Image (tube, rainbow, N blue to C red):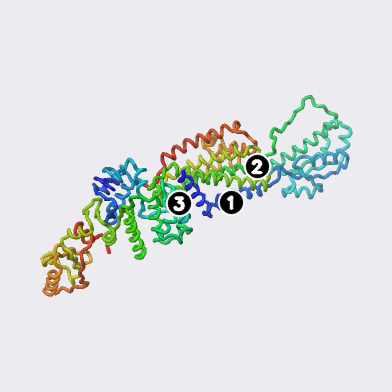
Amino acid sequence: MRAYWQLTWAQLLLFARNKNMIIWSFFLPIFMMLALGTFMGKGGNQFSMSVAIEDKDHSTYSKQLTTMIDEKAGVKVKRIPKQEALKAVEKGDVSIFVRFDKGLGDRLEKGKAYPKGEKESIRLYFDKSNPTVSQIGTTVINQAVDQLNKKAINYHPAVKVAEKDIQSRPLRTIDFLVPGILSLMIMSNNLNGVAATIASWRERGILRRMQGTPLKSSTFIAGQITARVLLNSLQAVAVLLVAYFVYDVKIYGSWLLLLMIILLGTLTFMSIGFIIASLSRTPETAGPIAGLISFPMIFVGGIFFPVRDLPGLLQPVVKAIPIGYLTDGLRGVMNEGATLTQLWLPTTVLTAWFAVAFAIAAMTFRWDVK
Amino acid sequence: MIDVKQLVKIYDGKRVVDGVSFHVSEGEVFGMLGPNGAGKTTTMEMVEGLRSPDGGEILVGGFDGIKEQTKVKELIGIQLQSTALFDHLTVAEIIRLYGSFYKKMRPLSELLTAFNLEEKKKGLVKHLSGGQKQRLAIAIAVVHDPKVIFLDEPTTGLDPKARRDLWDIVLQLRDEGRTVFLSTHYMEEAEQLCDRVAIMDSGRVIALDSPAGLIRELASDSVIEFVPGREEASSTYQGLGGVKEVKISEDGSVTLLTADLQETLRKLIALADERGLMLTGLRTRTSTLEDVFLTRTGKRLTET
């Protein structure tokens, strides 16, 4: 037991005295979060567009229509004349230009159907090369016009659609990203960290010197695990605190469950790290092997974008590897406030991965190079 | 204390340790002398339990060195040929860490004093000199007050001052009543420190006795070395009175082992006059373990 505590303590001291490790594993995730957070924008609304309006009608109706468009979420209305507005659309400063012609108010006042061959009262100008914006823009304006039309003819719909937002909490990009960054941090710290460190200790004979004492390999591994679990929890808390204070990212679920998932992830990726360290002959090969395994995981682990956005071909791979489950678990607790029961799939898969990887790690562990 | 019988280790089909047997008594300094690659380290590491033998028996302090390794490891302290420790831990932290691996641990201050490391107590391992590192390596070898200590080439790479310091430490360990098993390729070290020496070459023990006993076996207590002006057949020297052994090395220098120094010298000078040989670098000395190795194997221990 004394050996276990001493080994844990020694490893923590080694962490604390390794400046590179501190910079890479502590500040990198925070820098990454700050960089991505700034780049993606802090704003709650990811959608915003500006609409230029020229009102030649000047009736109560045209003014009402302008207000209605302006009140739509994410839409900013600028009032500018045609020439200027068209240039702005071309440059991309304005997504869409709307012109209300004279007579618009008259028609609505009369509430009559639109006669054939007559000039249209509302014109939209947009840049089709930007289909998303032009599509949303036309929809927004069509909706407003439609509403006004229905009102004018005193229209009562026979069937109504009720819309309900089931996302009870507003999910912003940064809320989505923070658990992903945590997941990435846990994987790279443990998988790459353990593989490189253990392989180098073996190469240098540090492990062989320990082999010459009554120390058991299980005690050694247990000390490593404890130190790394503590370090990872500390790093996770640091990232979460920065996320909370800078971006107001909240954890809706329980902290305990979150720490449990961090622990599971740490154990799983450490075990894989130990296996890589055992299988590679030298530290020079351990690093690249670990990199080769962890690098693709960044893309298929749902870290920066959801796993469902990946091509179907990759889905079986994604479902087999642990990183996606770790990300899901973290996201579940943080974004959705999920409970352990709701997270049975990620936790079960991670536990299974840990059990198998640990067994292999224990079997393949070697103190010595030969 | 240590009993080794017919120990064998095979690497890639080569018998690097080939039927080695010896006995180390309690309280003695036992040395293994031999050139690099003779199998000294491999033999030691098998006794320490770091490598598993391909044949033979090992008994350490009454425990089976193969089946009861945990018990053996509690009993022994080891210093590897190059002891690698965590660079970013301090001397005191390293001692405490290694002490925690054993059932009992000597007080830290006692170890720091014994190995002259008090000043470096809070210094990181990476900032230690070669001699300090080696002293720390031995300090952690005796951290649990072991009965047997293994030192694998403890002075290799050290400067003369540090080497002397280490010799003092070895003698101190012996005076504390511990059994010391060391390997070296310096014959001087073996002569100075060891009660008994096993000479190893090509995986075998070729001689085993006290240093004095080994030299006595040569039946020639003196050595004459010189460089003749021109090459002569070794039979030319063989006939000189008292000569037991003639070695001519590649650079042309001649080594004569003799039981009668005066007689051989007289005859050698006469021979040189007669044949017009120009003897340079002529010197005489008493026989050493180096000469024992030379006569037994025909090779020099260290190419100097």
Q: Mark 1 falls on what kind of element?
A: helix
Q: How crowded is mark 2: few (under 14 residues within 10 Å), some or many (20 or more)?
A: many
Q: Which of A13 and A99 is in front in this view?
A: A13
Per the model, the C-alpha gap separating discs 2 and 3 is 45 Å
In x, y percent, where is residue A142? 77, 36
> Residue B286 versus residue A165: which sits nearer the camera?
B286
Looking at marks 2 and 1 on the same chain, the residue that comes earlier in the sequence is marked by: 1
Q: Nearer the viewer, residue A131 or B281?
A: B281
Which mark identifies residue A175?
A: 2
Q: Is residue B128 above or below residue A104?
A: below
Q: Which chain carries label 1?
A: A
Relative depth, front residue between A126 and A208 = A208
Q: Which chain carries label 3?
A: B
Residue A3: image location, x then y, percent: 45, 46
Q: Is mark 3 on a helix, strand or loop?
A: helix
Q: Distance between the residues labelled 3 and 1?
A: 32 Å
Q: How crowded is mark 1: few (under 14 residues within 10 Å), some or many (20 or more)?
A: some
Q: Distance between the residues labelled 2 and 1?
A: 19 Å
Q: Position of residue B179 (x, y in %)?
A: 31, 52
Mark 2 vs mark 1: same chain?
yes
Q: Nearer the viewer, mark 2 or mark 3?
A: 3
**Residue depth check, mark 3 versus mark 1: number of the one nearer the observer:** 3
Residue B220 falls in which quadrant of the image?
bottom left
Name the image quarter holding residue A54: top right
- Which x, y percent locates residue B172? 34, 58
- Residue on which the image places disc 1: A27
User: Which amino acid does the dot numbered 3 rest on?
Assistant: Arg
What label does residue B96 carry, if any?
3
